[in-house]
């Protein structure tokens, strides 16, 4: 199984670098994962990371993209859903569903997504 | 702002679909990620290659030849005429000769000759080949660069269907523990949770609540999306992407509005929350049947009268072609209706009967074109008449929007190109193959945009929607152009 060393600890990942164990995640590892994705984390990213981790803890799955857009609208005071969606892609250019999940230490969303 | 990764090889769009000079081994290094132990075992496959794999593989190969007359014929009847060579979008895009359908089949045929024909003994004369790990590696590479779209079969004078050959090869590989992570993981999730994405019931309800709220905000109407409701008239089975991804969710809003305005009670199910059937991609009869069974078990349990399937290409093939023989008969359902019925036929019928009304001017900002999805176009039917799978979606678009243009002739209806992501290829590790496979279609998209100002690319397949949403920006087009037919219906329906 692929892994990386982090502060003396071996962190297991899947073949695409998503954490294998949810409990391995912490804020430093999030910074590290974000770096591998080429996404410099800002306050705006962190708000979404916290939110999606809570959502996952409650529902055992990442939120639908519309729920994510809705949350962005609330957090950033953006009324227009299209604008909120654009904003999401600015934060996570390779696709918010996958990049946000990865940085937040969640499994990769898979299926027809 | 972070930047897009600049790692992709993107063909230039000049509007031409030309036959490339062959580049042997061009995509030999593009591999699927291997399947995980848990997933393989859940599907009834060995976790990995074990002692005696070769005998086992040849045994399964023989079983296929004995039970599937089509595959046996395909092994024998090819005359190497070459009519298929330039018909595959993966060959056109990658230039790798192993992506010519004839050559892809040859990867299997040479092993067939070795074990199953008298001439196979004379290796050099018959160009036969023992099944070795090296050959297996080629199989794993190239039978996962075929999207089982069947375009080549349309042009083959003998009707050889490479999709069947690909499915047989994948079946043999899975049976000896050589599997692909993406499809096996997805199927395992269906068995564990009910759908490809792994959305449990409470999460699904939460998503549907959000959607109901959005419809209320936009239209002022209380449109419900019921879940697990016993006694509803219709069980609606969409692909799970309709519960999760964009633009898929816009079509789900469309279905909900149609049921609402028609006054037909319906429900989605948290148990049968997936129309898609990746078992078919693996050529696994057992898994295809098991996934399909969930729909009919749930129809019984919820005591519905009808089953309607949402916008998903291969799901429609699996549900329309195989349901009855795999899990029928459906004598517990209302015999006045087709079981299952496609959502496009369902909606168009309501429009024609005057039950619901559409105002196409609601989509006047759009110039719409339609991409036929391969499994609907070439592997199934819709409605009561020949070609219904082509006519019904187009009529529905024209009822929803005033401006419609066709894509280039020779690339529509049964001649449609694959999006480049079907058949279990919709996974990121082979993104370069997906980009290359989309090239022929993207040439015609460029033409439609340049010449006709097309700004809406209508689809009825969850895989197509995801693939094009990803691929359009890579080729320089706006992802927002990509959408479902019921997204147009959703805009146009008079509430």
Image (cartoon, helix red, strand yellow):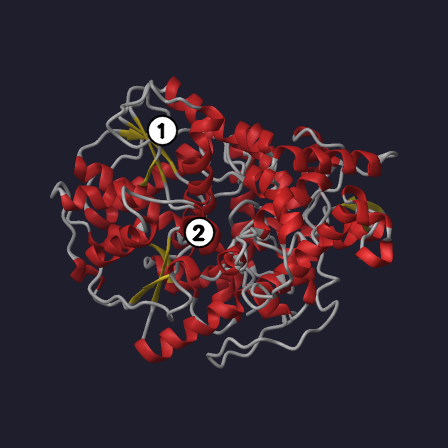
Residue A12 found in image quarter: top right
Front-lying residue, B271 or B163: B163
CA neighbours of label 2 inside 10 A, class few (<14), some (14 to 19), many (20+): many
Which residue in the protein does label 1 denote? B227
Front-lying residue, B53 or B154: B154
Residue drawn where x is 30% and y is 52% of the image: B393
Using the image, determine if residue B312 lies above or below residue B369: above
Q: Circle 2 — which element?
A: helix
Residue B210 position, x and y percent, is 35, 41
Residue A66: assigned label = none
- Label whose residue precedes the other's in the sequence (2 or 1): 1
Q: Do the dots labelled 2 and 1 sit on one chain?
A: yes
Residue drawn where x is 41% and y is 52% of the image: B377
Front-lying residue, B420 or A32: B420
Residue drawn where x is 20% and y is 54% of the image: B492
Task: Give the Cα distance between marks 2 and 1.
Answer: 33 Å
Side of A35 where B352 appears, left or right: left
Which residue in the protein does label 2 denote? B378
Say if residue A69 shows up in the picture. Answer: no
């Amino acid at each position: 199984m692929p892994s990386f060393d982090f502060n003396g600890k071996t962190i297991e990942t899947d073949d695409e670098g998503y954490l294998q164990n949810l409990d391995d995640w912490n804020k430093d590892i999030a910074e590290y994962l974000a770096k591998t994705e080429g996404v410099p984390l800002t306050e705006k990213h962190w708000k979404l990371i916290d939110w999606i981790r809570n959502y996952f803890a409650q529902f055992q799955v990442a939120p639908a993209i519309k729920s994510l857009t809705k949350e962005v609208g609330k957090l950033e005071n953006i009324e227009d859903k299209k604008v909120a969606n654009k904003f999401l892609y600015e934060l996570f250019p390779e696709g918010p569903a996958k990049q946000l999940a990865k940085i937040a230490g969640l499994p990769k969303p898979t299926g027809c997504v | 702002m972070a930047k897009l990764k600049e790692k992709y090889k993107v063909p230039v769009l000049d509007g031409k679909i030309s036959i490339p000079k062959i580049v042997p081994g061009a995509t030999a290094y593009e591999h699927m990620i291997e399947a995980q132990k848990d997933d393989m075992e859940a599907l009834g496959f060995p976790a990995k290659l074990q002692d005696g794999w070769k005998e086992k593989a040849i045994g399964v190969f023989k079983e296929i030849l004995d039970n599937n007359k089509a595959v046996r014929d395909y092994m024998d009847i090819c005359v190497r005429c070459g009519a298929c060579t330039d018909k595959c979008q993966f060959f056109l895009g990658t230039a790798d000769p192993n992506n010519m359908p004839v050559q892809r089949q040859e990867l299997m045929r040479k092993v067939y000759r070795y074990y199953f024909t008298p001439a196979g003994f004379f290796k050099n004369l018959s160009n036969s080949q023992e099944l070795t790990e090296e050959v297996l590696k080629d199989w794993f590479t190239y039978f996962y660069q075929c999207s089982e779209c069947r375009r080549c079969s349309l042009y083959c004078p003998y009707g050889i269907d490479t999709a069947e050959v690909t499915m047989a090869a994948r079946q043999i590989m899975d049976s000896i523990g050589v599997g692909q992570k993406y499809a096996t993981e997805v199927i395992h999730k269906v068995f564990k949770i009910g759908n490809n994405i792994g959305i449990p019931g409470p999460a699904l309800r939460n998503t549907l609540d959000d959607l109901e709220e959005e419809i209320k905000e936009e239209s002022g109407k209380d449109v419900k999306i019921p879940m697990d409701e016993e006694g509803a008239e219709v069980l609606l089975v969409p692909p799970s992407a309709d519960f999760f991804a964009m633009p898929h969710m816009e079509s789900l809003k469309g279905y909900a509005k149609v049921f609402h305005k028609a006054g037909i009670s319906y429900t989605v199910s948290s148990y049968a929350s997936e129309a898609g059937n990746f078992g078919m991609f693996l050529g696994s009869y057992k898994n295809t049947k098991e996934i399909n069974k969930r729909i009919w078990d749930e129809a019984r349990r919820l005591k519905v009268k009808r089953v309607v399937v949402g916008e998903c290409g291969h799901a429609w093939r699996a549900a329309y072609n195989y349901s009855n023989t795999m899990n029928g008969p459906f004598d517990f359902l209302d015999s006045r209706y087709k079981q299952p019925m496609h959502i496009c036929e369902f909606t168009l019928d309501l429009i024609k009967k005057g039950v619901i009304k559409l105002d196409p001017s609601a989509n006047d900002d759009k110039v719409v074109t339609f991409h036929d999805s391969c499994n609907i176009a070439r592997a199934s039917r819709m409605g009561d008449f020949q070609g219904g799978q082509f006519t019904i979606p187009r009529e529905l678009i024209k009822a929803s929007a005033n401006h419609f243009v066709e894509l280039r002739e020779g690339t529509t209806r049964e001649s449609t190109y694959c999006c480049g992501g079907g058949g279990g290829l919709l996974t990121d590790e082979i993104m370069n193959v997906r980009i290359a496979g989309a090239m022929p279609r993207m040439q015609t998209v460029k033409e439609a945009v340049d010449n006709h100002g097309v700004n809406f690319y209508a689809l009825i397949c969850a895989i197509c929607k995801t693939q094009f949403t990803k691929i359009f920006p890579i080729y320089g087009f706006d992802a927002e152009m990509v959408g479902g037919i019921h997204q147009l219906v959703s805009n146009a329906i008079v509430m």
